[in-house]
Amino acid sequence: METPAFSIAAVERDTGLSKDVLRMWERRYGFPTPGRDANGERIYPPEQVEHLRRVKRLMDLGHRPGKLLAASPETLAALGPRRAAVREAEAGPEDEALAELLGLIKQHDAAAYQHAMQQRLARQGLQDFVQHTVAVLTRRVGTAWEDGSFEVFEEHLFTELTKRLLRQAIATLPGGARRPRIVLTSVPDEEHALGLLMVEALLALEGADCIPLGTQTPLQDIGRAADAHRADIVALSFSSAFPQRQIGALITQLQALLPGHTELWVGGDGVARVSAAERLRVLHSLDDTTAALRDWLATHG
């Protein structure tokens, strides 16, 4: 059987590393080492693409590319987040039940996973479900991807099924006159939507009027949407995979585009180093989200 190979354009889309970076690394570090197709174009074997995925994620966590490119897969896995500490912190009475849910994803049993999650939602209520089931599972899936125990397609299956469930739950919440009015989205190249949905669920439960734009909205359009909807708040999500060095500049650019009365809230694992400022609130946890909303309501009557 012929071994599949990826074009440089496919590798760029898959890893988030630009073609220029891939060529520069090839010259400077001797990796990746692509072959050539019949037209002389670069083609990359799957194992190199997988290595590049892991390198990109670790770079986003602050590691330098030179050492990463020369490291073994085992070394890269050891450089990931403190998996043992995370697991220990999450261990408890629910630990076995959560492991069983992830087991259904590993068995590729989408129907059983959805049924089990719907039962947990009915039992816990939406707020506890988001904070103590979805948030914990999301962290565990990220860890499992990093240590190789979850395939990329399994991570995607978990994400899509969970997003579907959250959207269904949000759709059942009451409408009517609600405040504040909050536009939820992410900036270009930030494609992770699950965190946004978790935040939307908690905000809607507290009575906010949530206007979801999905992910990867251009900054100019975020500003236009805030103006068109007379938004009180724009809420952005940054995952740990988003380059942290870009976040500060993006926040500054977006603040200049927002109406004067509109606050900017930013949250997610990517904002650990972002500091609060005027009209900018940094949400480091889901609890921060509900606290911020209650503070806003107290201030604005």
Image: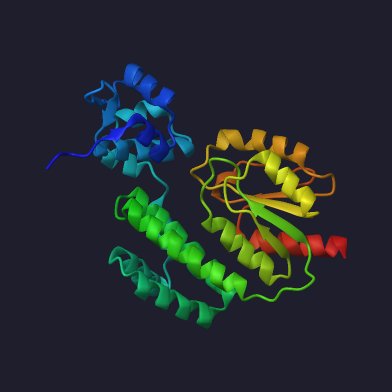
Q: Nearer the viewer, residue 48 or 285?
A: 48
State the residue at coordinates (34%, 58%): 154
**Measured from the top left, where is residue 65 in percent x and y?**
40, 28
**Lateral position of residue 182 relative to residue 246, left or right:** right
Dividing the picture into quarters, in which one does residue 257 lie?
top right
The quadrant in which the N terminus is found is top left
> Residue visible at 82% across and 45% down?
259
Q: Is residue 53 above or below residue 170?
A: above
Q: Residue furthest right?
A: 301
Looking at the image, residue 177 lies above or below residue 3 = below
Q: How far across and how far down the image is residue 26, in percent?
A: 32, 21
**Quadrant including the C terminus:** bottom right
| Residue 124 seen in the current view | yes
Q: Is residue 93 visible?
A: no
Q: How many marks?
A: 0
Q: Residue furthest front?
A: 39
Residue 232, given in percent of the width and then of the height, sits at 79, 55
